[in-house]
Amino acid sequence: MSYGFAAINTSGQTIISDEMENLHFLGKATLTGNDGGNYGDFPGYGGSNDTLDGRVIFTYTITATAPPLVFIKPSDYNRWHAIITQSNSGTTWTFDVIASGLSTSYAPELFCFVNANNTSGATSTHGLIVWKADGTTRTFDSRYNPLAISDGGTLVPPLDPTDGSGLPGTTSGHSWNYATNDHDFRSTTRYTSSAVTGTYSDLMFAAPSLAQATYKRQMHGHKRSCGFLGCCCQNHDSTAAWWVMYRNTFRLRSGYMDAGWTNYAAGYSFSSSHEGGGWFGGGGGSYSSGTMPYTAKTINLTSNAYIIADSTRYG
Amino acid sequence: MFNYIENGDSYIDLDDPNYMVNYPNVDPSTAGNWFVFNKQRVYYNNGLVLGHGGWYVKLDGATAPTYLGESSDGSYTVVFREKKGDPILQFEGVINGTKIEHYESSKALRMGVGNLLTGSNFEEYDRASSVNTWLARSWIENEQEELYFLVESRGMLDEVANYYSLPVPYNDELKATLDNNLQSIRFKSYDLNNAGEGNFVAVVVAGIVFKDGVATMLKLYETTRWGE
């Protein structure tokens, strides 16, 4: 480098330069609402193993002239969070954040960062601004709080998001109309961890929620009854199915960053039919309530880079 | 046999001497007949038969079964066919080839059979308080509705009849059956109480017909099977 500016720490790492654009605090996204919470249990089902973790979708917006990097600072560190959708219309950016549980009272805060050249509005007349060689593009501007990352690493959630023993599957041989779920679809114990430092209640994280999973427990019931001398047998069939779709979510707690799962949607379907007929009888066919987004599996299961920062630096 | 359905003589009842003669060898003289499997009669007004029908099969191994019936006065015939949408009552009745009788299972039946929480128990209707379990509703557009309930005793039928000021649907013979062998006329056995096999509920069905919101008829549905 024959000219320019560079700030290098004692480990030889470049902190500020005229070539590298630093991220700066843009502001907190505005909470615009939530969906009221859902899926604390299987919709339409009233039997055993009905309970799910539940989730609330909070929606936020912020104005930015460039894609912001968003950190989640939980208001309740017992809950799991992730950004599940991000979109923009012009300079208005919208984020949907999933939070575990059913309470709408614990909306997290979203701290948004953009590169220095996309910040504006500061009136301070003192500080340090670093431009690129073009003389117009700011790479650093001390009037805005630059992002300081305190920790980071990679995490991948477990393959199986369910607390129940073994992957849920499909079984036959049940009695006709058997419709009792035997699998625990909650995700309370399903996570992996990585050590972090700092006062966890001050920390916030940014991590992509890439992994998704859908799992289903399905039971086929059957009964066959026959008439005169074994003639004219009557088949009775039933199908009961419980399914849950999960998103990879994260949790900060004392000493650890966790990657786990939160149920995003769920459904229960049941169908009972038998050969027979006449008034108040008979028929076949099928019935379902809710449709799984894809066949049962986990997708996008890969290590997610996460970064952590101290939220108290930013107002 | 049927009186108003085409080729009614070829439908053989359980008590007919030609019922599956020589079975499992198929007798050529009856091979083309339909044999009833589940036979149903509908009673009203002190035991009059409103209609009858059932599930009929042929023994050729190729013809699909049929589900049909007719009214005693010949005013209608009905053919039942598959209709998806309801989790349990997956059929509809086609009356005289034109009108449709639709069926909807109740929340109680869905819960009892499949642990489903969907549906309703038809609370908006004038329901007799002596009934514990409402099973279903049917309707024919612009004509009538019917609420079906679980008959737990003959006394319950009496109370329902009294509530709506309608005649009971049974005669002396049926009264004896209701008092002494109620389960013998069950439509089906369901584990409504989640009590496991051996403790299924014999679902005996009665229905109240409403026209313009007024109860006009109390029906009893009898299902009989070979050997019972």
Image (cartoon, coloured by chain):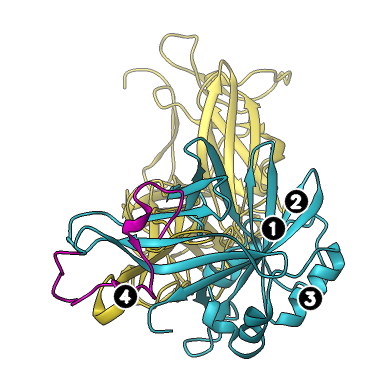
Chain colours: A yellow, B cyan
Residue placed under numbered mark 3 in the picture? B158
**10 Å crowding of disc 4: few (<14), some (14-19), many (20+):** few
Question: Which label lies toward us, 4 or 2?
Answer: 4
Q: Which residue type carries mark 4?
A: Pro
Q: CA distance from mark 4 to mark 2?
A: 39 Å
Q: Chain of mark 1?
A: B
Query: Which mark is on residue B17?
Result: 4
User: Could you say whether the residue bearing mark 3 is in a helix, strand or loop?
Assistant: helix
**10 Å crowding of disc 2: few (<14), some (14-19), many (20+):** some
Which residue does the image show at 25% across and 72% down from the upper left?
B20
Residue placed under numbered mark 2 in the picture? B210
Instruction: Tell me where residue A277 sits by quadrant.
Output: bottom left
Which residue does the image show at 71% across and 18% down from the upper left?
A125
Residue placed under numbered mark 1 in the picture? B147
Q: CA distance from mark 2 to mark 1?
A: 8 Å
User: Could you say whether the residue bearing mark 1 is in a helix, strand or loop?
Assistant: strand
Expressed as whole percent of the image width and height from the top left, the position of residue A35 reads: 67, 43
Mark with earlier residue (4, 2):
4
Dots 4 and 2 on the same chain: yes
Mark with earlier residue (2, 1):
1
